[in-house]
Amino acid sequence: MKSFVLLFTVMTVALSSISCSKKVAVLEEKENDFQKNETIYEVWTANGYEVKQLDTKPVLKGGEMSNRLVYKDFRYPAAARENGVGGRVEILVVVNEFGFLESMELIKGIGSGCDEESLKAVQNMQEIGFEPAIISGIPVKVRYIIPVIFKLG
């Protein structure tokens, strides 16, 4: 039986006003941002989404216990394991000013069940809820990308 490592981190990429077909290209150009673990949040404003500095980033309610709930049913898909599939799945999420996960969209997938497993984990986050992002003491709506890394090892 092969062992695997799952890295699940919260990172983002600015995706203002671009079509779905261009999102992957932007993500690839920003690969160094992911490697440096830089997070860019886009805040909803009257003019649409804009990159802004946050005082507080959105975080799952409940801390470490919440992370366990997100991963409790997470499995490296058998088809992916058998076929040696690994890589990064990226899901664009919107967390509103009330801490609810308003939407999620698969931006980049790798197939073999990994995309579905990643969406299921993010769905678990929706059930837990978030502490919203804050700017100047005011909760704000933000969007960002959650990457889920599948790696056989």
Image (cartoon, rainbow, N blue to C red):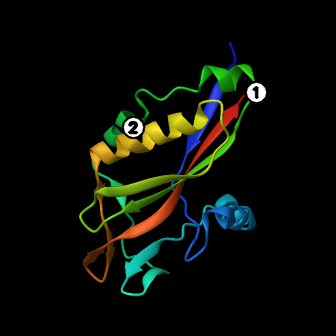
Q: CA distance from mark 2 to mark 1?
A: 24 Å
Q: Going by the picture, which residue comes out furthest to the top? A: 1
Determine the residue positioned at 73% across, 31% down.
Answer: 85
At 58% from the left edge and 41% from the top edge, which residue is drawn?
7
In-front residue for pair 122/133: 122
**Dot 2: element:** helix
Q: Identify the residue under disc 1.
A: 84
**Which amino acid is tagged 1?**
Gly
Q: Which residue is mark 2?
A: 70
Task: Identify the element where label 1 is drawn.
Answer: loop
Quadrant for the N terminus in the image:
top right
Q: Residue at x 64, y 37 (%)?
A: 150
Q: Is residue 149 above or below residue 11?
A: above
**Nearer to the camera, 11 or 91:** 91
Residue 118 percent location from the top left of the image: 52, 40
Label number found at residue 111: none
Badge 2: how crowded within 10 Å, few (<14), some, or many (20+)?
some
Q: In which quadrant of the rendered view does residue 98 lie?
A: bottom left
Q: Is residue 123 above or below residue 5?
A: below
User: Residue 126, image x and y in percent?
Assistant: 33, 47
Does label 2 or label 1 sit earlier along the sequence? Answer: 2
